[in-house]
Amino acid sequence: MTDKAPHSIALINAHLVDPASGKEMRGGIFTSDGVIRDFGPQVTKANLPSDALVIDCGGDVVAPGLIDLRVFVGEPGAEYRETIATASAAAAAGGVTTIVAAPNTTPAVDDPAVVDFLQRRARDNSRVRLLASAAITKGLRGKEIAEIGLLQEAGAVAFTDCSHSIRNSQVMLRALTYARDFDALIMHQAQDDDLAGAGVMNSGERASRLGLSGIPAAAEAIALDRDMRLVKMVGGRYHASILSSSLSLDVIARAKAAGLPVTCGTTINHLSLNENDIGDYRTFLKLAPPLRHEDERMALVHALASGLIDVVMSDHNPQDVETKRLPFAEAEFGAIGLETMLSAGLRLVHSGDVSLVRLLNALSTRPADILHLPQGRLAIGAPADLIRFDPEEPYVVDPTQLHSRSKNTPFDGARMQGRVKLTMVAGVVVHG
């Protein structure tokens, strides 16, 4: 993150939401030297130091900044799609104060030198905190385990092959065993690639009508069930990156009930959209895993509300026009989402399906807990990574106004509520 001298800043007259404790209150937050010094009803303009910068929030929500567990930042090797500077600007505009950079770059993040490169580039160019995740296997090829110990020592906070599912069970077993010995986190996107085949959207009637090959939900659940059995054998921390179906939810529910050290997440796209939104071959909605039936979307929403789903992320995956302005079957998977993640999540709050506290918990507190970070909570001494937003303020998503270098948003032209007005990282205002 770019170095700037922190100021004493107070956010007063706010609706404070602490997703860690579940508490909401009217009051303010006083920050200095990059941390929270005080918060609550007692923080008013009359009780603040004379040199503090005071911002009256007018009743807006103030909460911990969001933490996104998978963001493609483009560096190294794909700067034409995204850069650390543009990704972090998008993050700041969307209230995301910490991004975990995905390792599917060129070269892949499978060497400590690449982790160091990301950290140095982030210090010079990022508006928000950037943490590196590293590859589970060398070159993301699913064959040879990367040097997890050395990569962790270099600063990698988790290990993932992104959308590349590890097909070989022996390789996955070794990765879990190796990671367990370093208390490292494995984040895996499970899919039986043989069953998924050349599928490009959810298997079912909709795919048949569009003449597209489908990916069955069982492809995800079968691979996930295998992973749970391997976790039971060796232990180790495991996070299922993206769940997209009720079959997978059942697998995770059984694993959690058995006491396995597993957590899971989904994307804001899978919570907000379904296969019908693809319409007439809208390639910006070609995602991996694919958008499922509405019943599956609602199953994910209910799992988020109940706490079965721990984390919501954007899966920010910029693609340029050359790879998206193609026939649906030929287009690349992926969509951007850093700037719209909170607003899309607030749709679930406005519909009454998920509480604001629960949504923010999945966007900030639980990711922080899983990565062993001090962020994601309102607490004295905690990092002053904060956001201010009005959950009712309407706006229309205009791709030309988004900060990402690529514009492949699935919410093009969508009516949203909840634009972020201010983002603060380590006590420094980086947006607003």
Image: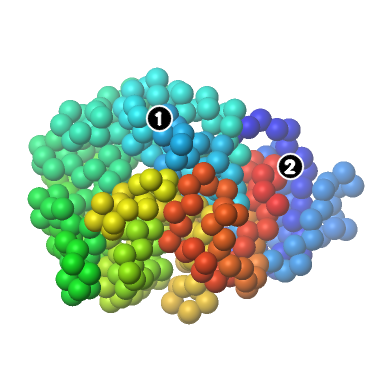
Badge number at residue 135:
none
Place of residue 147 in the rendered image (x, y in percent of width and height, measured from the top left): 27, 24
- Residue shown at 62% from the left, 71% from the top: 394
Q: Marks 2 and 1: in contact by CB < 8 Å?
A: no
Q: In this view, does 188 lie above or below 357?
A: above
For label 2, the SS is strand
| Residue matched to label 2 | 32
Q: Which of marks 1 and 2 is nearer the N terminus?
A: 2
Q: Is residue 203 above or below residue 337?
A: below
Crowding at mark 2 (Cα within 10 Å: few <14, some 14-19, many 20+): many
Badge number at residue 77:
1
Place of residue 20 in the rendered image (x, y in percent of width and height, measured from the top left): 51, 58
54 relative to 403 in the view: left or right:
right
In the image, what residue type sits under mark 1? Gly
Q: Nearer the viewer, mark 1 or mark 2?
A: 1
User: Can residue 380 be seen in the rendering of this structure?
Assistant: no
Q: How many labels does the image show?
A: 2
For label 1, the SS is loop
232 relative to 386 in the view: left or right:
left
User: Can residue 57 be seen in the rendering of this structure?
Assistant: yes
Q: Quadrant of the N terminus?
A: top right
